[in-house]
Image (cartoon, rainbow, N blue to C red):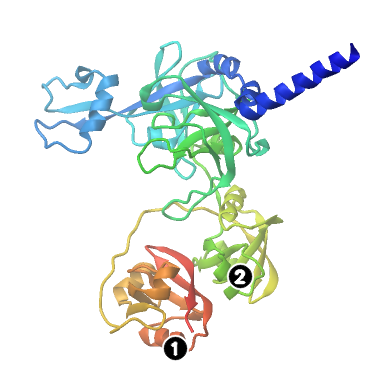
Amino acid sequence: MAHDIGMIVLTRKLVSGLLLALFPCLVWAVELPDFTELVIANSPAVVNISTVKQVERRSSRPRSRNDELDEFFRRFFPPGGGRSPDGGRGPSIRPMSLGSGFIISSDGYLLTNNHVVQGADEILVRFSDRREMIAELIGSDPRSDLALLKVDAQDLPTVELGRSKNLKVGEWVLAIGSPFGFDYSVTAGIVSAKGRSLPTEFQENYVPYIQTDVAINPGNSGGPLFNLDGKVVGINSQIYSNSGGFMGVSFAIPIDIAMEVVDQLRSSGRVSRGWLGVGIGQVTRDLAESFGLDRPHGALVSQVMDESPAELGGIQVEDIITKFNGQSIDLSSELPHYVGRARAGSEAELQILRDGEEITLTLKIGEAPERESRQVSARETDQDEPSRLGLNVENLDEDGRQRLNISGGVRVLEATGAAAQAGFRRGDVITRLNHKTVTDLESFLEIAEALPSGPTPVLIIRGRTPTFLALRVPE
């Protein structure tokens, strides 16, 4: 009998092992989380946000690429709702965007993305019980893409806030929002990475984004990202896509960062951030070799602004910042996160590498100024043929120097060979080559002629952004 029982147990184990080997999905099916209770508990605190803006209606206009978008809006907003009394010739109200948001306090404060409400004349909030209310914009912060709204209501359902710093890569997360206007759609996935940097046109990457594979589409913007405890850990903000739709990569603003912004918006309607006044770039493998580093790390200073905290504190171009207030800087994108969260007027200790030596500087943090978008145009002339570096350059005229606020430099007309491989583009302005200042075409050619083979750092200005490229000089 004992022998028979042993054979039965052994047979069951063999069958179970065979099933698991052939059908591993059975294991996953058991381990997949159940989101139903989380959705039921939190959906009432998630809202749909639409905005409208008064625009001048014309009697006729040519068809444009916006027609498909207009057709999309007409599905959710009746065409007669915004018609002006004069039959369509005067000002009308046109829907601008559809997004999501969530209630953070029972007295009517809501959080969403700045790009959802930017430029709106009226913000309409629709709740899960189909009530609609006009919201007041308390304040917005384009740098973090956050906006704080307020509706005139009490005893509203709210979400519970978690701590994004406690998130782990691989952890399950869930989004509730209104993709393409479909209210209260639920999607789930995992945290793919943390601390992702998505720089703006001014290389201002103040937000260490949470990367997920949760399906996020237009209309999800501003909606909450929950962990399995039902707590908000992020605000869905951006997707990485070539088509405009979800392609497996989406980004959320950490709730810890968002609530720091909210506190300032509630108290003053604006956000103050720490500022050094430097332009920085990533230390690549070739740049690390050219600076004599054992490995790539730190933030390479490519620009020091006049009268900035960095200049007053002694930071120089080609310094490599490796620590900020004791926090190690492995990637250059980490530095703005630390600096932005520092209080303006406070002292900060920076550890830098300069000419192979480690130096500690103490300086006072400034306040980040407002930015304006500017561009620089290119113009042609002079060098007859590319140099041994694969660069054909010209002298930078006085007008170009004034626009860039520099005293010298040469502009790239053509990049071939080693220069093309290093990433040089037509229009780049070279200001330093192999740690030496380039004042004009003559100095550039003189420095280039004496360059040894191997990687050498080149400081360029692209648009208005200084950055370093590692140019591997051929033998």
Q: How many marks?
A: 2
Instruction: Name the residue rendered at 38%, 53% in the picture.
Output: 372
Task: Name the residue at the right extreme.
Answer: 2
Q: Measured along the vertical axis of the image, is residue 218 above or below residue 107?
A: below
Q: Which of 14 and 205 is in front in this view?
A: 14
Residue 430 visible in this rendered orientation of the protein: no
In the rendered structure, the answer to whether residue 163 lies left or right of residue 10 reads left
Q: Residues within 10 Å of mark 1 (few under 14, many from 20)?
A: few
Residue 399 visible in this rendered orientation of the protein: yes
**SS under mark 1:** helix
Instruction: Name the residue rendered at 52%, 17% in the picture.
Output: 43
In the rendered structure, the answer to whether residue 93 lies left or right of residue 475 reads left
Q: Measured along the vertical axis of the image, is residue 239 above or below residue 429?
A: above
Which mark is drawn over residue 449? 1
Tell me which amino acid carries mark 1.
Glu
Q: Position of residue 7 (x, y in %)?
A: 82, 18
Q: Measured along the vertical axis of the image, is residue 153 above or below residue 393?
A: above
Instruction: Name the residue rendered at 55%, 66% in the picture.
Output: 301
Q: Are marks 1 and 2 in contact (CB under 8 Å)?
A: no
Q: Nearer the viewer, residue 301 or 471?
A: 471
Judging by the rendered image, the residue that carries numbered circle 2 is 314
Q: Position of residue 87 (x, y in %)?
A: 11, 21
**SS under mark 2:** loop
In the rendered structure, the answer to whether residue 240 lies left or right of residue 97 reads right
Q: Where is residue 345 in the image (x, y as percent from the top left)?
A: 61, 54
